[in-house]
Image (cartoon, rainbow, N blue to C red):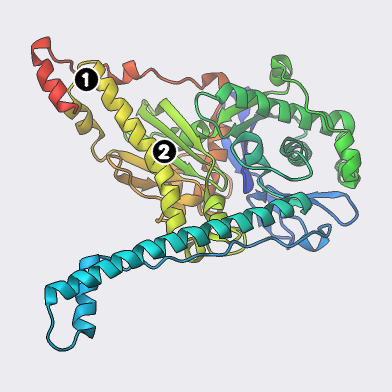
Amino acid sequence: MDEIRVGLDFGTHQTKICVSRIPDEGHGVPEYEFFQFVDQKGEVQYFIPSVVQINKDNTLSYGYVDPKNEKDCMPLPRMEVVNYVDIGDIEDAAEELYSKYTVGEDDEDESKAVLKEMLRNKCEIDKSTYKVRSEKAQAKYDEEMSAYNKDKNLFRYFKQATFAEYPWECKIEPEVLCVWYIAYIIFLLEDRYPEGFAINMGVPTDDKNYHQKQELGTRILLTAYHLVEEVYHQDLRAFLKEKVNDLIGKTFLLPFSEDEKEYNRINIFPEAYASLIGLTSRGKLSEGMSINADIGGGTTDISFFIVKNRTPHIYKYWSIPCGLNYIAEMSGFDYSEKDFVKNAHKDIIAKFNKKKEDIVYNLERNLIEMVRERGILKSNLIKALKDRILVYNGGGSTYSQISTPINLFSDVKVADADLWSEEIVKDKTKVGKLFNLLTTAYGLSVSEDDSEVVLRDFDNLLSSYKKVESNERSEIDKDVC
């Protein structure tokens, strides 16, 4: 009997599924297939939108919904864009004004000094005006969005609101929407794989909150299974005919149970880990200290690791509650409707990039501090980190504005389908074009048990660096300053 393992990449913007089928009760060569969905046009897709909609008749739709059938609500607000024009260098601007407008004889130095003072005052006034207008625009947008969120009947970002930092004011709790959406996915999977399967799902989390998020993810999956099997008895039509208020009355988040988790073969992995497994399982990344950044719709998952014997040794991972949707929303457009490159504002992109940079800078500072405490020369660490790999994947990796080098991690690589070259993947050419979107789903299908998620000790990482003798201590102290 084949062992079937479902890699469920439950995304903020869209969900992808990779299914591994391993013959001979899990001892054969695995074959991989990406689950296919059918959109509103009848076309096959390898992803499904993470969307739940209340329809005009109070039933619900999932994934590829018909927006014309959404129950009426107020329109989506748009944020006013406030522009600030920087005059640039004061000296150059004053020189240009003097040359262009001054006539007759005058005191050149005095005139330029006056112009510089005028320009400085103008800059201060412009900055103050820009700040006031920006704050007013933001306040107006926040007020309109609050009213819209309480009224709307099409729900997105419920996954991010459940597992990450995302404000939620909608009429239905995000955890409940996660349960319904995943229940719909399970209906589809059980129809395709009636013989049963293990399910591996990723959650956005840092290393400190992993076990808490693991329990929450398990509870959501257990509740979804309960709806599918105990409430609706695997009848998808009955589930889709249910009215929203009746479905709310039948949905109660089940408690965490290790026994039920094992019985249903549920594993919950950090998305940063799953993404990394998908990149390193075939030894395509070189050994040494590296960073992986998976930029998704709602979160950006980052891990610091080294590769040994084709296995990632993870020392730290983070999840930033910002991704492509953050940039789109703050730039005043819907990521699913408009071109990202043309509509994303430079200042918003800069803010997003700074969030990544802050994590890497803090990591580097912490490494230097650990090196100092252990009596290791800072220069040895800097040499080891110089031009190290920063590999991007996820939907955001296709945009050069946000797939940027960060300080010592300057060897930027974007994951590509070459990582699958040794695998048996159905429709490999087709799915290869979507590689950056499908990496995490693949990594989840490769992963076996969430008990294998173990952080490595930094002492182990730094043990190979030579310590200096006490009489060389002054050199160390000088070096780490």
Residue type beneath disc 1? Tyr
> Badge 1 is on which residue?
465
Give the camera-side residue of 21 and 40: 40
- Please, which residue is most extreme toward the left here? 471
State the residue at coordinates (62%, 49%): 13
- Crowding around mark 2 (Cα neighbors within 10 Å: few <14, some 14 to 19, many 20+) is many
Give the camera-side residue of 4 and 375: 375
> Badge 2 is on which residue?
292
Residue 94 seen in the figure: yes
State the residue at coordinates (40%, 50%): 403
Q: How many marks?
A: 2
Residue type beneath disc 2? Asn
Q: Quadrant of residue 11?
A: top right
Give the camera-side residue of 428 and 345: 345
Where disc 2 sits, the SS reads strand
State the residue at coordinates (54%, 48%): 437
Residue 462 location in percent, x, y?
28, 20
Q: Quadrant of the N terminus?
A: top right
Q: Quadrant of residue 218?
A: top right
Residue 360 location in percent, x, y?
36, 37
- Crowding around mark 1 (Cα neighbors within 10 Å: few <14, some 14 to 19, many 20+) is some
Where disc 1 sits, the SS reads loop
Q: Label 1 vs label 2: CA separation?
A: 23 Å
